[in-house]
Every structure is written in C-alpha cells, then in structure tokens.
Amino acid sequence: MSATDEAALVERLDQRGLTLEHHRRLPDWIRALLKSPAQRLRGHEVSDFLHQLTTLVSAGVPMVQSLRLIASDADARRLSPVIDWLADEVQSGTPLSSALAMQPRIFNERIHALVRAGEQSSSLDTLLTQIADYEARAQQIRRQIRAVLRYPLIVISVALLVSVAMILFVVPRFAAMFTGLDAELPALTQSVMALSTWLRAQGWMVVLITASLSLLVVPLMARRPTLRAGRDWLLLRLPVIGPMVAGAASAQFSRTLAIMTAAGLPMTEALPTIARTMNNIPYYQAVMQINERLHEGQSLEQAIAASQRLSGRIQQMIAVGEEAGRVDEMLRHIADIEDAQVNRAVESLSKAMEPLLMVMLGLIIGALVLAMYLPIFQMGAAV
C-alpha cells in the first residue's frame, strides 16, 4: 500500500482495520519517476470532473459507479487513470476526501477539505455542486488574471528582442557610416552606439547572469517562505495588480468559509484549512491570526478587523451577518461582490493595457530609429 506520507498511510490502514508495522520512504528521484504525466492536469479538467461528478451523484448514481462512468467517458486520456484510481480507492473503503488528498498535485487542499466537510455532514451531494461551481469560478478568475498579465509580458519581450536586434545588428552599420564624419554626433546617437559596443562585447555575460539568476531565484522563491512572503507583499502593493490579488484572496476566503460553515464545520476547524489553501502568504498569516483570535473568544468581525487584511466593508457585512445569525449567507454575498470587482478590474486593465503598451513599444523603437537618423537629418540641415 502506498500513500503521500506516514500519517496518510496510518489513516488508510485504520480505515481497513490494519496496523502499520513497517514502512519505507522511496527516494525522491524514484518518486519523481512514478509521477506520470497523467497527474499533471489543467485546472479546467479538474472543474469539469467535479461538475460531472456532481451531476451523477445528484441523480442518485452511487459514487463508485459515477467515477467509473466519468473515467470511461473522459475526453482527456490522462484524466481516466486518475479517476479509475479514485474509484478503486473508494470501492476499497477509502473516503473520497482521503482519496483526493492522496493526489495533492491534482486536487488542492481546498477541494478535499470541502469534500470531507460534506462527508461529515452527510450532505456531500449538495456540497459537491458548490465545490464544482467554486472551482470553475476560481479557475475563470485565474485564467483572466493570467491572460491580462501575459499580454504585457509578450509585448515587452517583443520590444526587447527588436531593440536588442537593432542595437546588435543595425546600429553597428550606422556607426561605421558615421565614423568618417567630422561633426560631433548627437548625445542620443552616442549613447546608443556606446550601448551597442558594450552589448556586442559583454552581451554573453548579461545572458549568462540573467539565466543564472533565473535558475537560482525561482526555486528559492518556491522553497523559502521569507522570499515568497516578500514577493506576495510586493505584489499586494502594486498599483493595479495589488487590489485584484487582494480581491481574489478575499473572495476565496469568504466563499470557502461559507461552504464549510454551511456544512456544519466549526470555524476554528475550517480556518486552518482555509489558511493552507491561500496562495498569498500575507493572507495565510491573516487567516491564521483570525483563527487565533476566535480561540481567544473574539467574534469573527472583531478577529477580521484585527487582521487588517480584509476591507472595512467586509467587516461591516460580517457584523450584520453575525447579528442576524446568517454568517454563511453573508459570506457568499461578500464573495460574489469581490469576484465581480475583480472581473471589472481585469476587464478595465485589459482595455487600458493595449494602447499603453503600443505607445511604449513605439517610443522604444522610435527612439532607436531617431538616434540613427538624427545625424543624417543634421547633415541635411547643414547643407
């Protein structure tokens, strides 16, 4: 029998009335080889799977049979083995939430935590619908934000490539032509020619240093919480991107907490799980602080106010929900409002980004062209 760690292995054995006597951890390189491409699924494939499972379970089809039907009808080849494996685990007595937890690269902690809450409250069929809708909504927001961020990266990359090509190959031809001139070249032309000379001599060093830093910083960013915290802190303070990230995190917190509390899970149990699903470390820390203050006897509104991460509007709505005894419903309204604001911000940014980037691209290329033709214009004016 295999599992992701010792605790998961003990849990699986306990479910079958067995006791762990000996276990061995596979070397990391073997574990990496065992992770087949079928395990690397896109976000929309997971949300599609959850929607299909919701439809079948709501129609009264048993869980194992539902999983088998989805596996046999899966459009993506790499999805079928995973779902078949889930069906085998559930058929052998493993709860669906535990089986999902054994595939953390596919099903995030939020998914199996919500499924576990549904199993504990005997409302899994109802909760699956909310989970599927939530994952589809979260995937759509992530896709929109990535698309908005990807466009400027592409334009900036094209601008850099064109600029470097001009500096390395076009500028030297003009420099050779200007060598025999007695007149002093404009400052802009001299600067561009000096940059061209330096890049042609030291360009390999720039590429080497940039590649080395990328290979070093990216893995460190993923492994070092302090570096990730610094990156997330900086991201939250960017003029336009920061509010979008904060809104998405607030919506994630509110909707997940609403689903868990509606399923009967105590907030003090739900919040640590929600914290672990937050992709932004400052928000992870804020949720953990909220949980600590709830343990101290504070209300949810007081704990949120002390965290200083969620907006005043959210605090006021939570206070109203607590007074009316409808916190889960109010949390859903908060999540809907935050999602709508993120969508509007993404659309506005997308509309404003294109003309700004075109202007930036034109200025960069135009400055290089002007630097090369400015001496020619001056010579023509002097004649």
Image (cartoon, grey):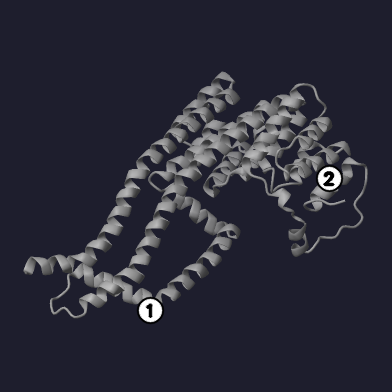
What is the crowding at mark 1: few (fewer than 14 residues within 10 Å), some, or many (at least 20)? few
The residue beneath circle 1 is 201
Quarter-wise, where is residue 382 in the image?
Answer: bottom left
The residue beneath circle 2 is 11
Q: Depth check: 194 or 347 in front?
A: 194
x and y percentages locating residue 239 in the rendered image: 38, 46
Q: Depth check: 324 or 152 in front?
A: 152
Q: Quadrant of the C terminus?
A: bottom left
Give the left or right position of residue 315, taking residue 292 as reference.
left
Task: Using the image, determine if residue 236 lies above or below residue 115.
Answer: below
Secondary structure state at the residue bearing disc 2: helix
Task: Using the image, determine if residue 233 lies above or below residue 347.
Answer: below
Mark number for residue 229?
A: none
Asked whether the viewer can see residue 266, the reply is yes
Task: Identify the residue at horizontal 83%, vertical 27% (top origin).
Answer: 62
Q: Depth check: 227 or 309 in front?
A: 227
Instruction: Kindly report the distance in space between the C-alpha atoms of the residues bearing marks 2 and 1.
Output: 62 Å
x and y percentages locating residue 64 in the rendered image: 83, 33
Q: Is tag 2's residue or tag 1's residue first in the polypeptide sequence? A: 2
Instruction: Kindly check if marks 2 and 1 are in contact, taking CB atoms under 8 A apart as contact.
Output: no
Task: Using the image, determine if residue 188 lies above or below residue 109.
Answer: below
Q: Which amino acid does label 1 sit on?
A: Ala
Give the left or right position of residue 179, taking residue 7 as reference.
left
x and y percentages locating residue 315 in the rendered image: 49, 31
Q: Residue furthest top?
A: 324
Q: What residue type is labelled 2?
A: Glu
Task: Identify the residue at horizontal 21%, vertical 76% (top origin).
Answer: 178
Asked whether the viewer can see residue 308, the reply is no
Give the left or right position of residue 235, taking residue 66 as reference.
left
